[in-house]
Amino acid sequence: MDPDVDINPDTDDLPLRANTNDILVRHYVLDLTVHFDREVISGSIVLFLEPCSGVRTEDHIGPGLDKKDGTEGRSSQGRFVDRQEDGRKGMIRAKQEMFVAGEGDREELEALFQTAAETQNAQSSHVWETSSDDDFTVVLDCCDLDISKVEEVDVTLVPAASSLLPEAASGARSGDQQAALIQRIISMPSSRWRQKQQLFSLCSRAPGAQAGTSLLFHRDRWSLQVRKRGTSSPQDFPRAVRICYETRPTGGSVRWTKDQDGRVCVYTAGSPINNRALFPCQEPPVAMSTWQATVRAPSECVVLMSGEDQAVLTEDGGTPFSVWHYHVTMPMPASTFTLAVGHWCQVSPEPPPAPARGVRDCVECSKMDKPGIGSGEWSEAGLLPGLGSSSSEVVKGSPLQTCSGDQTTRPDPAFCYCSLEDEGLSVTDYSGMVDDGIGCSHGDYPCRFAEQSARSQRVIPHRVFGPVCLLQKAQTAVLKLLPRCLAAAHAVLGVHPFSRLDVLIIPAGFSSLGMASPHIIFLSQSVLNCGSPGAGEDGLSLCGSRICHEIAHSWFGLVIGARDWTEEWISEGFATYLEDIIWARAQQLSLQDTEEQSDLKAVLRWRRLSDELQNSEEELQILRPNMENTGRVSESGSSTVKHALNPDKTFMQVHYLKGYFLLRFLACQVGEQPFIAFFRLFVKKYHGHLILSQDFLRMLLITFPDIEREGLSLSAIYADWLDRPGIPKWLHERSAVWSRSRLVAEVKAEVAKWILLSQSHQGRRRKRKRKEPKVNYKELVPEQLVMLLELLLEEAELSAATLPLLHRTYDLQSRDAEVADYRRR
């Protein structure tokens, strides 16, 4: 079956081509170099594979019980590219030399390696076209990548790995030995994660397998397909595969641009095609894996990634590059991999002085704020003595604070460790420490939910980065609010899923206000406007609520993800609902103030949702567009994401807003506080899993059986909220109640004053100026001001004199991005 046979080029669906029911990537090792001059990232990725066990993944059947399919892989037709046998010996020699050479020889050896690859690619298409269709094919999601070669990695040449096998296995076939070695490494317990990562690193640098075992590959629009001659099943396919490639400047996964200081940078932009134009991968969410990455970038740059620990930084001897090492031990979908390379500076806890020399200061700032430089490379000499001990210290540098197993717990001075007493926050909240008997049910990895120390860690270590020109604003807003928002999130949801957090102020042109990934958040510069002097907490409203929204994704969207990407509401609806609760907690609002603020925001969101649904296609309004087929995939594991490439969908908020209102509806059925307590129980049960809507809803109905007895069923929720366009009846009725709340009534009273003033201006016909009547306008909180501007814009006409007075009265020029949006209309 051709992987593209089911794809209609005229549709807006995103294909997920990876055959994840046949074989899974368990670990990626990336070795990348950033070239700003050409706007490409080049290097290699090594995939460590495991064939599936023989049972197909269909409906989700509970935590840790997803089933896998071991059906025969189907072959693909078309024009394929392979490597010519001539020149293979040269490539093997090059890789063997590179494996044992020092860093100083890397550039010369890479050139030799590239020459060998070019030779082999010269006459390759005929080789594939005459190969057998019975050969098993690994299909990876891939686009906009130039693949130079694909090869099997001979991990048996790594002594540290070979020592894992019993002596009886030494006489087995090479392929069997390699499969056994990789399986041993993959199966290592989480308590030995450091040794496991070291072995993966060493194996990734092993040379290619011997002649006669070349891998054939083909690229089409959406996939990379790889075969090995004579291999008819996933079980016989090589377990370690190296792909050498280069991104394209126009690739959709990363954005090459300049920051606010005018310095070059590149970052993963949250594209609808995710990371397939950054590295070949398995994109379906079920293909969760760990990874480690080495990134070479110009020495004046800082590399930030979604890795667990602060990067181990080394110098690339004799070159103008520095080398950054990151890793993760929690299996995650490939779409969560995040990279940002630029001339970022770390925001100091003390207010930074205004830059006097502009951009020229950025280089020095970047150097000053980098982590300490160490060796960072894993060598066999360093690894071998520690193979029997999970606590051996092999990597030099400064590991962060910890999770479990063999991690260390030294605080790092580059991170902020805030005193909550200094912030005036309560330190007596132990909601995250309650032991309710629910344990981890996910696969084996170092999990913070299992750690007693993590339960009491209200504020995780955090850093903020940005361009020089925005450091002061970032310090005043983001760095000030982060500890409060983190502590509030912990009080609401319990254990922080990740051990640290970086926040990057992303370059202008970023398409949203924020984006959350494991251990890192991108924030738009639009949230940094702190308002007029003396605005106090009101000036931080947009920044605070956005930070809370992105932090909430740590629980819903990351450590718990949607098994079907069409169910975006599981991530965005939950984060929108939780941002209000977390932000109110961070502000230490009273119950009454919290309720009034919540009702005001509900009215604003109701208005936006109503407007969006009136001006969009009905098929884009459905939260569960696949309905009863949600979560289903083809026999091989491939699928499509409905409407993912529709440009209109990029700007729609229906999954945020309609999902938010569904959760408000459910909270009304069971009570707000019991509903939040249920969130914590759900997180403890399902962290580390992918879910469907039914997983959350079924557990809710089981936990609160009274609501089902009163007529609220799973099918009713599907029918009213998830499977139909439009607005449910409950929401129509409830919006009228919210519209009568005190804060909304205050806004309507102010709108009436402005309309009267405008009418008085329009009614004047005298040439002589009259003194403006004195009107006492009420001070409004930011959300009230947004509503006031919305209502005034709905008026058919406003006098010209009214607009300047609005600007002066509310100081619109210094307000945040939400207000500025109305000011520009």
Image (tube, helix red, strand yellow):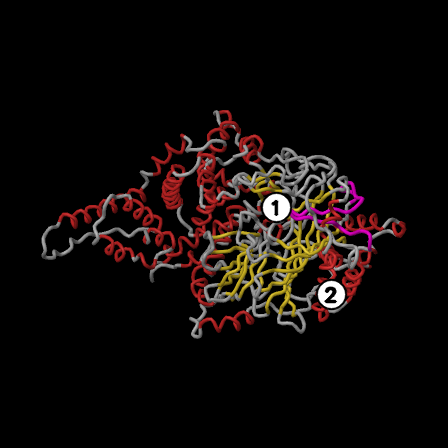
Please say if 484 is above or below 566.
below
For mark 2, give the secondary structure: helix
| Amino acid marked by disc 2 | Leu
Residue 320 in view of the camera: yes
Looking at the image, which residue is at 45% across and 60% down? 480
Q: Is residue 136 above or below residue 393?
A: above
Mark 1 touching mark 2, by CB under 8 A? no
How packed mark 2 is, by other alpha carbons closer than 10 Å (few <14, some 14-19, many 20 or more), is some
Does residue 154 appear anywhere in the picture?
no
Query: x%, y% of residue 778?
Result: 26, 51
User: Bounds of the magenta span?
Assistant: 211-236
Q: Quadrant of the N terminus?
A: top right
Neighbourhood count class around disc 1 (C-alpha, 10 Å): few under 14, some 14–19, many 20 upward: many
The image's mark for residue 273 is none
Horizontally, residue 307 falls left or right of residue 184, namely left
Q: Quadrant of residue 727?
A: top left
Question: Horizontal and vertical percent for residue 431?
Answer: 53, 46
Q: Is residue 253 left or right of residue 19?
A: left
Q: Nearer the viewer, residue 822 or 461?
A: 822
Q: For residue 222, which numbered disc appears in the image?
A: 1
Q: Nearer the viewer, residue 89 or 771?
A: 89
Residue 422 part of the magenta segment: no
For marks 1 and 2, the one nearer the N-term is 2
Q: Is residue 220 magenta?
A: yes
Marks 1 and 2 sit apart, C-alpha to C-alpha, by 30 Å
Asked where in the image residue 325 lies, by quadrant, the reply is: bottom right
**Residue 112: assigned label:** 2
The answer to which of 753 and 90 lies nearer the viewer is: 90
Tell me where residue 389 appears, x and y as whole percent: 77, 58
Residue at 24% x, 56% y: name it: 804
Identity, as a three-letter code, of the amino acid under mark 1:
Trp
